[in-house]
Amino acid sequence: MSTAVELRNFNDGEAPPSELHLLALDYPTRLGVAVFPLAERTKIPLYPGRHPQWGHGYKSATRNPKLITECWTTHPYANIAIRTVWEEDGIVAIDLDRHYLGQDGVEAWDNIANEYGIFNTLMTVTGADGNHLLARVPKGRILDGTSGTVIDGVGGIDFKTHGYIVAPGSTHPNGQLYRWVNDEPIAELPEWFFTDSERPTRKSKPASSKKIFIVGDLSRRDTIAHDILAGVDPDALLGRDTLYRLQDKEPDDQGPDDVEPPESSDKDRTHKMWRIILGAIRVGFDPDALYIRMLDSPHGEGLREHGRDWFDRQCLYAARYHADRIMVAQDCRTDIEDESAYEWERVPFTTEKGHIEWATPDAMKKILHEACNVAEENMTDQPILVKTKIATATGLGKTTVWRAFHGVVKLGWLEEIPEPDREDDWPFKYRLLPAESRRNRRSPGAATGVMHMRPESSSSTPRSGTPVGSLVPLENPSWKSLVPDPLALNGSI
């Protein structure tokens, strides 16, 4: 098992580029794992939604040596991530964090080992002095997070079943290196690790009180929501607007910090708590950490009155809200290439000076794909698009990008959202419009090459009557129609 590359001591200095390249090639061959690149000295994917091969995080992981070589030749200092998705690889990781809200995961794991037995498997030391234990999933075992395991609800211990870990040889943001602790093979999780008497199926109800937000057969929407809730980013930071609301202020309130907030009704305060949860889930902030922060905020009293079950339900509703926006982007991306439904031809438009310009089909489709990438990455159907960055990402010239934006707006795929006092070089916010608004849909039974241009409409409201991107407040009677009761779980989540 041992190799000179893998077991070399990296403590004396940063791993040279060639060594990271060799390690990225070595791990799939020797350990059977899939890898993908992270940005230098970070735990963040190198290409967050901006690359055809590497733009989907751990879903982009590969064992292909050609792709690995191409990547690390171009980015020799890129950190290495090992995918831990039990359905794909049969490999998971037990993540022991020494600094999780004052709890020591390493100490907690030692206590578990003293009670149940030692688990000998391949192990790393992280850049923050924690540990990652790689393990194989027993055949026939169905995992549902930490439910039904001895680490369920144990602070400082995370179970990486749908994610990734940073691999040894990589550099932590604090400058420390990840390294191997031993040369053990990746062992199968022992029977004592599982506390359930029977091996669960996907339809089994979790036996513990640990948050399992969604159970049963998942719809497409709930599958996306589940992935959102499972994708906690330990480095996530709350946005400015969310931080303002945590202080019981509105984002446009620029008053001094020592000014008492105005009196709010219970309805206003509940809505503000919902907006805090919505913003936190969007950036991958840990719900457990958010709950603690909200208890220590001006919203603490109201949150205690609602209770933890209410908070957990709002996290689910927030994930489903964001899932709806992601589905808009995904459906739009699919529709772009649906030649049976849409016809793409050159689109003319008139400039402010009265000149006739043309937008080409290829350029318009590239613009829309990139708009969908930005929308999906940010969980919104109103992506903010910087045209110079779009030009770089698509490889198109700025003039071609300008023409293409005019074309897709005229065809009813995007709508520009007016912003007062915006300078020419500021980002532009657009709205992804529903299929009803698109003007290049084929007529029923139309032959290929015949484009049906629907009349332009000044309204972007779909047939349902709710504008795309509108936020239905928590107290609105139509809220339940937007987010139904979580799979009829008898009021529990």
Image (spheres, helix red, strand yellow):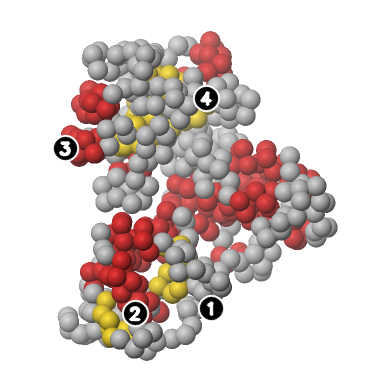
Q: Is residue 264 left or right of residue 80?
A: right
* Residue 349 location (% of width, % of height): 32, 84
Residue at the disc numbered 1: 465
Mark positioned earlier in the residue sequence (1 or 4) = 4
* SS assignment at label 2: loop
Mark positioned earlier in the residue sequence (2 or 3) = 3
* Residue 424 location (% of width, % of height): 45, 69
Image mark count: 4
Q: Nearer the viewer, residue 40 or 151?
A: 40
Spatial CA distance of label 2 from label 1 is: 21 Å
Spatial CA distance of label 4 from label 3 is: 34 Å
* SS assignment at label 3: helix
**Mark 2 and 1 residues: CB-CB less than 8 Å, in contact?**
no
- The disc placed on residue 97 is 4
Residue at the disc numbered 2: 411
Identified at 38% across, 14% down, the residue is 11
- The disc placed on residue 66 is 3
* Residue 357 location (% of width, % of height): 27, 81
* Residue 364 location (% of width, % of height): 29, 70
Identified by mark 4, the residue type is: Asp
User: Does 79 sit above or below residue 302?
Assistant: above
Look at the image and tell me in which quarter the N terminus lies.
Answer: top left
Identified by mark 1, the residue type is: Gly
Identified by mark 2, the residue type is: Leu
Identified by mark 3, the residue type is: Lys
- The disc placed on residue 350 is none
Spatial CA distance of label 1 from label 4 is: 48 Å
Q: Nearer the viewer, mark 4 or mark 3?
A: 3
**Mark 1 and 3 residues: CB-CB less than 8 Å, in contact?**
no
